[in-house]
Image (cartoon, rainbow, N blue to C red):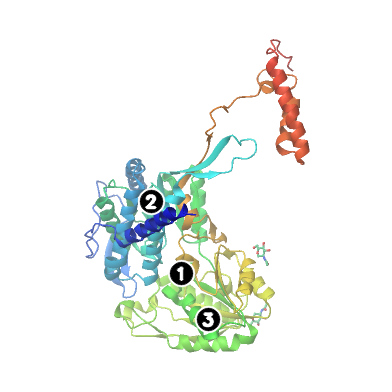
């Protein structure tokens, strides 16, 4: 009776200590990051670049400056330097890696938020979520993992070990410049790799500012210089990167994804492709409508719709279709579009001028095939030069799958809304897409929403929410079909930066040594086949009795063989 008291006291004391330790903040060094306008990074030697990456601030078209478009030799040089640095970093401790993350967390959550003009809150939050997840669980998922060793290897121990692959390359899109740069860097560096990131020609300016932050954090923890590189350029630069790294992560369009994969087939490196989507947003008739309408509009308009997991197809049950549309119309009517820096607008610019035309073409195609515009948002006071950089939020009704707007990724602030009769019809419609990234399903009955989502062929599902899985950074992110394959984020994404090695070793039993049983030692005895048969029956026989009987025979055979001297004659061979 009295035995467990001291144990209980000890456990309580331990819990209390853990709690108190949690209250002591870790010491995180501060770093100085030059937040002034970017300077052109110094170039060593050659100035053979054929082209420059010109940078403009999208909302105002203000010219920011340019970066060099790196030629293949320069890219190779960056990767070579990264590879050297990685050899040193591979030996770093998880403690040192965590310190690197803590510095980035401090910068992201405080300083960057103030200076980073075009960062949406979502970018900062997802990045902070990723860092805290890596701090809490990263090491656990990279430690050797023990697995079952099976029947024939019962005397052994089986495990998986994770080693860094070397230099992780990433070619990232422009829609979330901060997160898209930090995301591959965090996973790569935490798992002991180097990283070379090619930023989009449309977001090079900010990319180079983030580079200074990463560089400062690395040097604050004593990591080797050159562990992380950010490079700028166009297709040629990207191709050279694919050709020289040990793994490539690509975020972009299916067309470019195919080219990357082709390139990667030459060096046979692993590829992770995140190629966008045409996500469905399904609303059953039993929902709390005003709430869902707010989520729906945000799902379509966040970042001006430039979101690979943005909602692009809306399927609404016929019983609530009319009120859903009228409530969406009411909200969108009140939305005003303008330059985000002036603060008072609901939605900002889109990144590329050509993109406005593409969006308008999608809308025109739908109108020609019988769709109608239910409402469009209004423009605020736009600068004269920048009108083309904006696209009004647009709600389309009377749409169906004959229209391009229901098939092609728009990547813009358009909400096409379609009616459905039954859950089966909603599933059929939502599933009818060449993309398969994500979906969002809303129902007052959560089980029903789950049932619908489970039948959709896609990589990510949000039940009664939108894109919530991306806030849970323990989860993998990625799709199927034209949305690509492989996963980033989560356990899967972290381990995808690793050389996964299967290792079998002896258990502690010192008396069991690896040895080939006599009957199948070379030269194979006449009982060799019989022995194998008994072994198979012993290990995998259907009934326990069969297996026991075989075991007895097996042991008998072994002892007989051991008693006999080894045969001297060689067998006749064909
Ligand atoms: C698509 O919608 C348009 C306009 O509502 C209609 O005229 C057309 O018949 C529809 N096509 C199909 C295949 O349902
Ligand atoms: C959804 O599409 C996939 C392939 O794209 C298919 O295998 C699956 O059967 C479809 N599911 C339903 C419910 O139609």
Ligand 2 location (quadrant): bottom right
How crowded pointer 1 is (Cα within 10 Å; few <14, some 14-19, many 20+) is rated as: many
The x and y percentages for residue 558 are 70, 22
Q: CA distance from mark 3 to mark 1?
A: 19 Å
Mark toward the start of the polypeptide (2 vs 1): 2
> For mark 1, what is the residue?
307
Cβ–Cβ below 8 Å for labels 2 and 1?
Answer: no
Q: Can I make out residue 487 in this image?
A: yes
539 with respect to 359 (left or right): right
Which of the 4 image quarters holds residue 112?
Answer: bottom left
The x and y percentages for residue 216 are 25, 55
Q: Can I make out residue 496 in this image?
A: no
Q: Nearer the viewer, mark 2 or mark 1?
A: 2
Q: CA distance from mark 2 to mark 1?
A: 26 Å
Question: Mark 3 CB in 8 Å range of ligand 2?
Answer: no
Which of the 4 image quarters holds residue 335?
Answer: bottom left
Q: Quadrant of the C terminus?
A: top right
In this view, 243 is above or below 420: above
> For mark 2, what is the residue?
190
Local SS, label 1: loop
Mark toward the start of the polypeptide (3 vs 2): 2
Residue at point 29%, 62% (across, down): 106
> For mark 3, what is the residue?
292
How crowded pointer 2 is (Cα within 10 Å; few <14, some 14-19, many 20+) is rated as: many
Cβ–Cβ below 8 Å for labels 3 and 2?
Answer: no
Mark toward the start of the polypeptide (3 vs 1): 3
């Amino acid at each position: 009776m009295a035995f467990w008291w001291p144990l209980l006291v000890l456990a309580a004391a331990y819990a209390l200590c853990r709690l108190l330790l949690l209250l002591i903040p870790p010491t995180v060094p501060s770093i100085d990051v030059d937040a002034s306008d970017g300077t052109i990074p110094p170039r060593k030697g050659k100035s053979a670049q054929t082209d420059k990456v010109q940078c403009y601030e999208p909302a105002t078209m203000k010219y920011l400056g340019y970066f060099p478009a790196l030629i293949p030799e320069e890219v190779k040089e960056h990767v070579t330097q990264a590879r050297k640095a990685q050899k040193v970093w591979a030996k770093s401790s998880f403690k040192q890696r965590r310190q690197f993350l803590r510095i980035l967390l401090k910068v992201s959550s405080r300083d960057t938020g103030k200076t980073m003009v075009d960062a949406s809150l979502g970018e900062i939050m997802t990045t902070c979520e990723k860092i805290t997840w890596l701090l809490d669980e990263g090491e656990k998922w990279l430690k050797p993992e023990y697995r079952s060793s099976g029947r024939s290897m019962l005397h052994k121990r089986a495990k998986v070990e994770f080693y860094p692959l070397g230099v992780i390359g990433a070619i990232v899109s422009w829609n979330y410049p901060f997160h898209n740069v930090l995301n591959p860097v965090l996973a790569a560096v935490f798992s002991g790799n180097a990283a070379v990131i090619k930023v989009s020609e449309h977001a090079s300016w900010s990319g180079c500012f983030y580079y200074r932050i990463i560089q400062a954090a690395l040097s604050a923890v004593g990591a080797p210089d050159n562990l992380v590189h950010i490079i700028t350029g166009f297709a040629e630069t990207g191709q050279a990167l694919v050709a020289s790294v040990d793994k490539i992560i690509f975020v972009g369009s299916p067309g470019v994804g195919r080219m990357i994969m082709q390139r990667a087939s030459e060096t046979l490196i692993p590829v992770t492709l995140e190629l966008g989507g045409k996500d469905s947003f399904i609303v059953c008739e039993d929902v709390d409508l005003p709430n869902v309408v707010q989520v729906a509009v945000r799902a379509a308009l966040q970042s001006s719709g430039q979101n690979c997991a943005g909602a692009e197809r809306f399927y609404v049950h016929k019983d609530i279709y009319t009120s859903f549309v009228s409530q969406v119309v009411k909200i969108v009517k009140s939305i005003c579009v303008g330059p985000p820096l002036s603060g008072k607008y609901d939605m900002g610019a889109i990144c590329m001028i050509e993109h406005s035309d593409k969006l308008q073409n999608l809308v025109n195609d739908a109108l020609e095939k019988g769709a109608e515009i239910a409402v469009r948002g209004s423009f605020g006071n736009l600068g004269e030069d920048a009108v083309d950089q904006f696209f009004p939020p647009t709600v389309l009704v009377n749409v169906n799958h004959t229209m391009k707007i229901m098939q092609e990724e728009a990547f813009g602030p358009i909400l096409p809304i379609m009616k459905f009769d039954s859950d089966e019809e909603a599933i059929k419609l939502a599933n009818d897409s060449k993309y398969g990234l994500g979906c969002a399903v809303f129902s007052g009955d959560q089980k029903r929403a789950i049932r619908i989502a489970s039948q959709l062929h896609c990589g990510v599902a949000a039940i009664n929410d939108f894109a919530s899985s991306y806030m849970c950074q323990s989860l993998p992110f990625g799709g199927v079909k034209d949305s690509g394959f492989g996963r980033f984020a989560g356990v899967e994404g972290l381990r995808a930066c690793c050389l996964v090695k299967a290792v079998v070793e002896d258990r502690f039993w010192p008396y069991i040594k690896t040895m080939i049983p006599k009957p199948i030692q070379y030269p194979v005895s006449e009982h060799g086949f019989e022995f194998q048969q008994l072994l198979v029956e012993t290990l995998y026989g259907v009934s326990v009795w069969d297996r026991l009987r075989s075991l007895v025979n097996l042991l008998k055979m072994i002892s007989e063989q051991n008693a006999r001297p080894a045969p001297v004659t060689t067998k006749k061979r064909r």
